[in-house]
Image: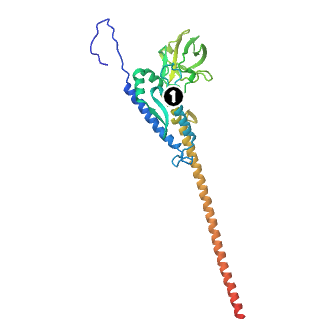
């Protein structure tokens, strides 16, 4: 920011910030291009010939991993963001991005004029369609990471979060539709929902340490939060579940492996099994070869004996003819 002058005391100044629409549009276009490259590969693996069978290059046709990946991408792209008010932009289609089938399979199509209109008239709604949004009435409460998969019924809902010090014991609870649900809270002020409650899909909420540590007996800190999870955030979290590398220490799993790593391991195991099968087949083939060679040698011996017998018989008959 550059200050070009000083206003007189008491005079109101209005500061406007222009949204970086070109940067937002560039990222949307990049998303469409990258998604279509992934779809090109998926389409190729689903290609069928005139006989209805997978073409020669569709080596992964019918693969469960690719089928699951295709489903994640399509369902994310076609979704309507839960919790966005009626009349506002709610989907990629509202931004001019549609999922259509062409001669090469399914691809994203971008209507440039419709996207420009959405960006110029409703840039905040565009970001709401695409990104994770967390709003709070108390800035001491933060949710720095989006939920892995937010329950659709929580999108746009007013959710109460309260932390209270009762008799020196600090506890927390959520409020949804006037019903209170107990939550977990640790010594650092990290609030997490309990399993089996309607809030279990929420990611952790953090109460600022300075506020948490200053809670006296009888004190309560509370807020009302609203969350919407945009399409790119949903898709990103879905793909994280695909590409994430697993981490185990001392036999304990710290990070669950994504489906790609599991599929890669399965294929590797299948290759190893096939190599063992091939080795056994080769060993069996070698044994059969040696058996056939021994049989051939015996046949050669029998053939020589047969020739010798034939020669003897021929000699016998020749002698008999001379005598006659």
Q: Which residue is nearer to you in this view: 26 or 262?
A: 26
Decide if residue 27 is on the left or right side of residue 281: left
Decide if residue 198 is on the left or right side of residue 223: right
What residue is shown at x 48% (from left), y 17% (from top)?
135
**Residue reaching furthest to the bottom:** 323
Q: Which residue is nearer to you in this view: 31 or 188?
A: 31
Could you tell me residue 311's position as x and y percent?
A: 66, 84
Q: Is residue 106 above or below residue 190?
A: below
**Residue reaching furthest to the top:** 10
Q: Is residue 315 visible?
A: yes
Residue picked out by circle 1: 234
Q: Is residue 199 above or below residue 10?
A: below
Q: Is residue 130 above or below residue 35?
A: above
- SS for dot 1: helix
What residue is shown at x 45% (from left), y 28% (from top)?
96
Could you tell me residue 176's position as x and y percent?
A: 58, 16
**Quadrant where the C terminus is found in the figure:** bottom right
Could you tell me residue 266's position as x and y percent?
A: 57, 43
């Amino acid at each position: 920011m550059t200050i070009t002058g000083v206003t007189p005391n008491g005079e109101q100044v209005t500061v406007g910030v222009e949204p970086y629409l070109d940067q937002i549009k560039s990222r949307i276009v990049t998303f469409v291009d990258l998604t279509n490259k992934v779809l090109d590969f998926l389409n190729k693996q689903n290609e069928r010939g005139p006989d209805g069978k997978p073409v020669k290059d569709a080596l992964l046709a019918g693969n469960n991993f690719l089928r699951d990946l295709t489903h994640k991408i399509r369902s994310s792209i076609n979704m309507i963001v839960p919790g966005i008010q009626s009349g506002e932009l709610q989907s990629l289609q509202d931004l001019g991005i549609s999922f259509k089938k062409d001669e090469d399979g399914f691809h994203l199509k971008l209507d440039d004029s419709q996207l420009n209109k959405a960006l110029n008239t409703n840039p905040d709604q565009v970001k709401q369609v695409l990104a994770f949004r967390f709003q709070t009435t108390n800035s001491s409460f933060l949710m720095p990471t989006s939920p892995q998969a937010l329950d659709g019924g929580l999108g746009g809902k007013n959710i109460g979060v309260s932390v209270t010090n009762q008799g020196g014991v600090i506890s927390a609870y959520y409020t949804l539709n006037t019903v209170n649900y107990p939550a977990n809270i640790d010594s650092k002020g990290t609030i997490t929902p309990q399993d089996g409650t309607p809030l279990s899909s929420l990611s952790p909420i953090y109460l600022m340490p300075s506020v948490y540590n200053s809670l006296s007996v009888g004190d309560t800190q509370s807020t009302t939060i609203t969350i919407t999870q945009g399409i790119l955030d949903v898709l990103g979290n879905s793909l994280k579940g695909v590409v994430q590398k697993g981490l185990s220490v001392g036999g304990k799993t710290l990070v669950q492996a994504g489906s790609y790593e599991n599929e890669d391991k399965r294929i590797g195991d299948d290759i190893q099994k096939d190599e063992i099968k091939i080795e056994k087949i080769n060993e069996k083939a070698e044994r059969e070869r040696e058996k056939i060679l021994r049989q051939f040698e015996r046949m050669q011996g029998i053939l020589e004996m047969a020739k010798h017998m034939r020669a003897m018989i021929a000699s016998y008959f020749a002698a008999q003819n001379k005598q006659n």
